[in-house]
Image (tube, rainbow, N blue to C red):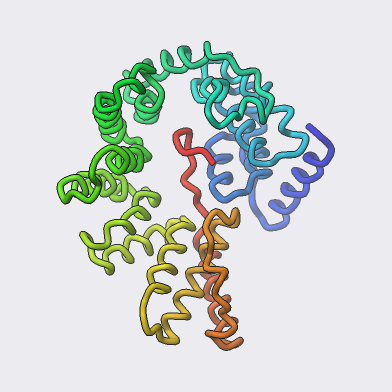
C-alpha cells in the first residue's frame, strides 16, 4: 500500500472516529460504505477480509482501485488474479479481454480461459438459486448468439427473466434495454412488458428501476412518475433527483415555487451523486431565478435531508461503476 493511500486511509479512519462512526470488519459493511462513495472507509471496513485473502474482499478492493487511478492501479491485476484463483467468477470476468480494453488500460494479466471458468462457476451458483449468477450467464454465456441475433435476443430475455425471478433486480434494467434494442419499444404491448419488469424490481425497492419510469410518463402519468422518483430520492439515488429537476424544468410558465423545486432537486442530485455523471442543470443561473435568502433556505433543506438520507449508488457485482 502506497504512502499517499495510507495517509488518506488513516485520515478517513480518524474522521470516522471523530464523528463517532465505528469501523467494521466485513465486506457487507464495506459495500454499504462504498454505496456512499466512502471508498477509503470501505477498504478499511474490509481490511480484515482483505488480509485474510477473502476473494470477495479482494475483488472489491480491485474495483475500488479502478475508480481511484494513481499508483493503486498497479495492484489491480494482482488482486483480481488472487480472487479469481480462489474461484470468484466476478473477478474472473474482469480478467477477460473486452471491447473496453480494460486489460490494457489497467495492465491486467488477462486470459480468455477465465471466461469458461467464470461461466462454469455461475452455472453452479445459478443452480443453487443465485439470481446474480443467472444474470451474468444471460450476459456472457454462448458466444454463438452474436451470429443469430433473434435467437440470441430470445435466449437472453428468457435468462434475464429467470434472473429477475431469482432476485437479481438489475435484470429488470437489462430486460428493458433488450426490448428497446431488439423490438419496437413504442408498441403498447412491448411497453407494457417492459413496464412489468421494471415494476417488479421497483416494488422490491430498487431505485434504478424507479428512475426508468421517467420513460413511461404517458402510461403512468406524471404524478405517479414523480412519486416513484421521490421514493428513489428518499433511498439516496441521485439520478432520481436529477429527473425530478428535469420534469419541473420542462414545465412552461414556471412559477417561483417551480424554480425552488428545480433548485432543490438539482442540488440533491449533485450531493447524492458527486461523481457528476448527470448534468445537474448547470446551464441555469439560479441567482437570476431565486433570491439569496431563498437559496440559503433551500440549501438548509438539502443539508437537513442529507442528515437522514445517505447516498446509495445501488452497486453490486452486476452493476459496477
Where is residue 16? Give x, y as percent: 69, 52
Question: Viewed as shown, does residue 138 lie left or right of 191?
Answer: right
Name which residue lies at 61% across and 18% down: 110
Quadrant housing residue 253: bottom left
Q: Please, is residue 288 above or below residue 172 in the view?
A: below
Residue closest to the eye, 68 or 184: 184
Where is residue 311? Give x, y as percent: 53, 55
Question: Viewed as shown, does residue 131 lie left or right of 305?
Answer: left
Residue closest to the eye, 290 or 230: 290
The answer to whether residue 193 is seen in the rendering is yes
Q: Please, is residue 152 above or below residue 171 in the view?
A: above
Q: Residue furthest front?
A: 147
Where is residue 241? Give x, y as percent: 45, 63
Question: Viewed as shown, does residue 168 lie left or right of 49?
Answer: left
Quadrant housing residue 153: top left
Quarter of the image where the C terminus is located: top right
Where is residue 263? Give x, y as percent: 51, 75
Q: Please, is residue 299 above or below residue 207 in the view?
A: below
Q: Residue furthest left?
A: 189
Name which residue lies at 16% across and 51% down: 188
Residue closest to the eye, 233 or 308: 233
Name which residue lies at 45% across and 87% down: 256
The answer to whether residue 57 is seen in the rendering is no
Q: Please, is residue 138 above or below residue 41 in the view?
A: above
Quarter of the image where the N terminus is located: top right
Amino acid at each position: 500500500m502506497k504512502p499517499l493511500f495510507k495517509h488518506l486511509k488513516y485520515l478517513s479512519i480518524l474522521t470516522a472516529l471523530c464523528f463517532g462512526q465505528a469501523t467494521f470488519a466485513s465486506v457487507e459493511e464495506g459495500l454499504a460504505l462504498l454505496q456512499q462513495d466512502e471508498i477509503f472507509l470501505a477498504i478499511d471496513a474490509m481490511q480484515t477480509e482483505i488480509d485474510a485473502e477473502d476473494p470477495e474482499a479482494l475483488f472489491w478492493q480491485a474495483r475500488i482501485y479502478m475508480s481511484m487511478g494513481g499508483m493503486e492501479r498497479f495492484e489491480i491485476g494482482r488482486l483480481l488474479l488472487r480472487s479469481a484463483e480462489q474461484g470468484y467468477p466476478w473477478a474472473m470476468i474482469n480478467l477477460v479481454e473486452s471491447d473496453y480494453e480494460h486489460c490494457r488500460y489497467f495492465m491486467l494479466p488477462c486470459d480468455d480461459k477465465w471466461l469458461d471458468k467464470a461461466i462454469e462457476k455461475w452455472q453452479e451458483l445459478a443452480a443453487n438459486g443465485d439470481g446474480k449468477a443467472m444474470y451474468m450467464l444471460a450476459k456472457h454465456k454462448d458466444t454463438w448468439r452474436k451470429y443469430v441475433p433473434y435467437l440470441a435476443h430470445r435466449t437472453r430475455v428468457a435468462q434475464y427473466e429467470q434472473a429477475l425471478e431469482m432476485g437479481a433486480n438489475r435484470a429488470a434494467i437489462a430486460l428493458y434495454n433488450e426490448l428497446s434494442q431488439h423490438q419496437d419499444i413504442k408498441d403498447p404491448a412491448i411497453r407494457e412488458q417492459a413496464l412489468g419488469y421494471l415494476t417488479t424490481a421497483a416494488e422490491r425497492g430498487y431505485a434504478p428501476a424507479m428512475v426508468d419510469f421517467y420513460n413511461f410518463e404517458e402510461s403512468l402519468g406524471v404524478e405517479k412518475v414523480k412519486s416513484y422518483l421521490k421514493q428513489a430520492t428518499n433511498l439516496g439515488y441521485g439520478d432520481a433527483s436529477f429527473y425530478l429537476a428535469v420534469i419541473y424544468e420542462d414545465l412552461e410558465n414556471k412559477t417561483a415555487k417551480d424554480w425552488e423545486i428545480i433548485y432543490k432537486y438539482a442540488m440533491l442530485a449533485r450531493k447524492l451523486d458527486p461523481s457528476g455523471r448527470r448534468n445537474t442543470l448547470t446551464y441555469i443561473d439560479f441567482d437570476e431565478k431565486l433570491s439569496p435568502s431563498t437559496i440559503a433556505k433551500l440549501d438548509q433543506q438539502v443539508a437537513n435531508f442529507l442528515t437522514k438520507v445517505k447516498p446509495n449508488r445501488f452497486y453490486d457485482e452486476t452493476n459496477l461503476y
